[in-house]
């Protein structure tokens, strides 16, 4: 079933969204991208005469009620964006009456699903080494099914529009789909768009294809780096992982971030790139700082010769040029992870150079996909979100999709 074919009139739809928005210390939303992302789906259902039961997680409350992660804090914002008052169910597993009372055009937001350990389905308070762990895990899987069944009982149909959690087999993202037949479950618009964007990058790749992988660690990106190696022409590896590569080659990296147990892996990646004819672009110079602070003293030094007491926090000017050269002329571009500690205004130049080169290539006709919370925050910080082809709401989900893995949230609906 698709959202465009389904007749929502007079029906209740339970929609899994990703409203895991960042809040400031007063509980105010600091970035509402994720709420805006789900609006087309939510509005379509309301406009068609359906009633909405919206469910989401927020943060990592680890199976316990924690007011800091209460979705009550976003009720007003969601009401305002949807243009209708939103009712709130303070216990997501005890919302049957509130759901039953919903009339067409009405909206009920359920409290944070992760206040229940059943949402994630991991046994709590028991160590993996404990002999009783396997039994606890089995018992939890059963309670997870019961929890998903309760959520399913609120509605006539299920819509999954939470791409950010599509790589998780949770109660609300996958297990719940077992309680709806194929004619009553579907992906939302955001999910469809995300799947299409990944497809644009992976199928019928237009070359040259340049992938830019940054962020703090190589270990969290290794799966995707290896997968991309067979597809890309240029692979830029930047950010904190630069220094693991520099050290692996015998360089001096001062206090720079480094994964000492991944030095062999770094050399292996370099060898693989060479064997496959991939142009691997690593930083040659960097902006080193004498402290991990925006106000630190800085100097530009070779990325493999950083003085003691200093740490590389951004790509240097020579490196920025090399990055831009590998992006210029590309027809397909994927960017995940910043090239420096972009949260500090004084260390944004590397990421900015990448963003600018991507914007130029996009203007020339490239398809550019930006994903992962930090690269999206980066592009938003530079005010360049409208100059790239597609910004994904998924971090881990996007990477797993590009690695070629089947996402449980999508498989649960599409089979
Ligand atoms: P990740 O979550 O692995 O995508 O990494 C994103 C984080 O990497 C951001 O918070 C950046 O501040 C950080 N990062 C990027 N470059 C560096 C660097 N040279 N040293 C330390 N952290 C970095």
Image (cartoon, rainbow, N blue to C red):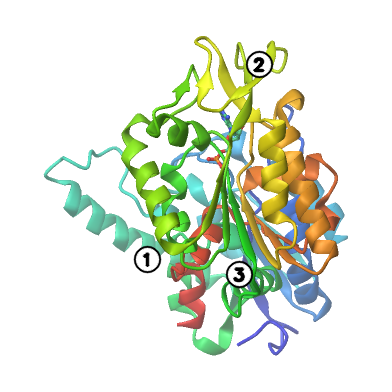
Location of the N terminus by quadrant is bottom right
x and y, in percent, of residue 18 in the image: 63, 56
* Nearest the eye: 377 or 97: 377
Badge 2, how many Cα within 10 Å: few under 14, some, many 20+? few
x and y, in percent, of residue 82 in the image: 83, 61
**Is the Cβ of the residue at disc 1 closer than 8 Å to that at disc 3?**
no
In the image, residue 252 above or below residue 43 = above
Give the CA separation, mark 3 to mark 2.
Answer: 36 Å
Badge 3, how many Cα within 10 Å: few under 14, some, many 20+? some
**Is the Cβ of the residue at disc 3 closer than 8 Å to that at disc 2?**
no
Judged by depth in the image, the label closer to the viewer, 1 or 2, is 2
46 horizontally vs 237: left or right: right
* Nearest the eye: 263 or 217: 263
Q: State which quadrant residue 331 falls in.
A: bottom right
Give the CA separation, mark 1 to mark 3.
Answer: 30 Å
Numbered circle sitting on residue 293 = 2
> Which residue is under mark 1?
145
> Which residue is under mark 3?
198
In the image, residue 240 above or below residue 291 = below
Which residue lies at the image location 68% right of the left edge and 87% below the top edge? 6
x and y, in percent, of residue 273 in the image: 45, 56
Which residue lies at the image location 86% right of the left edge and 53% below the top edge? 80
Badge 1, how many Cα within 10 Å: few under 14, some, many 20+? many
Which residue lies at the image location 69% right of the left edge and 35% below the top edge? 318
Comes first in the chain, label 1 or label 3? 1
283 horizontally vs 365: left or right: left
Comes first in the chain, label 1 or label 2? 1
Give the CA separation, mark 1 to mark 2.
Answer: 47 Å
In the image, residue 186 above or below residue 303 = below
x and y, in percent, of residue 158 in the image: 58, 75
Kindly state the secondary structure of the residue where label 1 is placed. helix
Which quadrant contains ligand 1? top right
């Amino acid at each position: 079933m698709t959202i465009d074919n389904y007749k929502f009139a007079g029906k209740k739809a339970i929609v899994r969204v990703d409203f895991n928005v960042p809040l400031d210390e007063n509980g105010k939303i600091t970035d509402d991208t994720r709420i805006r992302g789900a609006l087309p789906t939510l509005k379509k259902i309301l406009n068609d005469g359906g009633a909405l039961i919206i469910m989401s997680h927020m943060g990592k409350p680890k199976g316990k009620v924690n007011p800091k992660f209460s979705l009550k804090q976003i009720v007003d914002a969601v009401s305002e964006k949807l243009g209708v008052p939103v009712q709130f169910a303070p216990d997501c597993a005890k919302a049957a009456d509130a759901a039953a009372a919903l009339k067409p055009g009405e909206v009920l937001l359920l409290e944070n699903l992760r206040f229940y350990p059943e949402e994630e389905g991991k046994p709590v308070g028991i160590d993996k080494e404990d002999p009783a762990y396997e039994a606890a895990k089995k018992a939890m899987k059963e309670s997870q099914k019961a929890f998903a069944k309760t959520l399913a009982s609120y509605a006539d149909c299920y819509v999954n529009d939470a791409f950010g959690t599509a790589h998780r087999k949770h109660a609300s993202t996958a297990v719940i789909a077992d309680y709806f037949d194929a004619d009553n479950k579907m992906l939302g618009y955001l999910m469809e768009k995300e799947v299409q964007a990944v497809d644009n990058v992976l199928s019928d790749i237009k070359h040259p294809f340049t992938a830019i992988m940054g962020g703090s660690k190589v270990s969290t990106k290794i799966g995707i780096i290896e997968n991309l190696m067979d597809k890309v022409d240029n692979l830029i590896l930047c950010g904190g992982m630069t220094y693991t590569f520099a050290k692996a080659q015998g360089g001096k990296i001062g206090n720079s971030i480094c994964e000492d147990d991944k030095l062999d892996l770094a050399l292996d990646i370099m060898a693989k790139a060479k064997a496959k004819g991939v142009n691997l672009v690593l930083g040659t110079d960097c902006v080193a700082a004498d402290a991990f602070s925006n106000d630190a003293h800085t100097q530009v030094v070779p990325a493999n010769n950083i003085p003691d007491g200093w740490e590389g926090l951004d790509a240097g000017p020579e490196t920025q040029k090399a990055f831009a050269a590998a992006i210029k002329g590309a027809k397909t571009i994927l960017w995940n992870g910043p090239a420096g500690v972009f949260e500090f205004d004084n260390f944004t130049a590397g990421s900015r150079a990448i963003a600018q080169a991507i914007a130029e290539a996009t203007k020339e006709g490239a398809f550019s996909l930006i994903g992962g919370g930090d690269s999206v925050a980066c592009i938003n910080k530079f005010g360049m979100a409208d100059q790239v082809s597609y910004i994904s709401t998924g971090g881990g989900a996007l990477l797993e999709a590009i690695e070629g893995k089947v996402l449980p949230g999508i498989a649960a609906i599409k089979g």
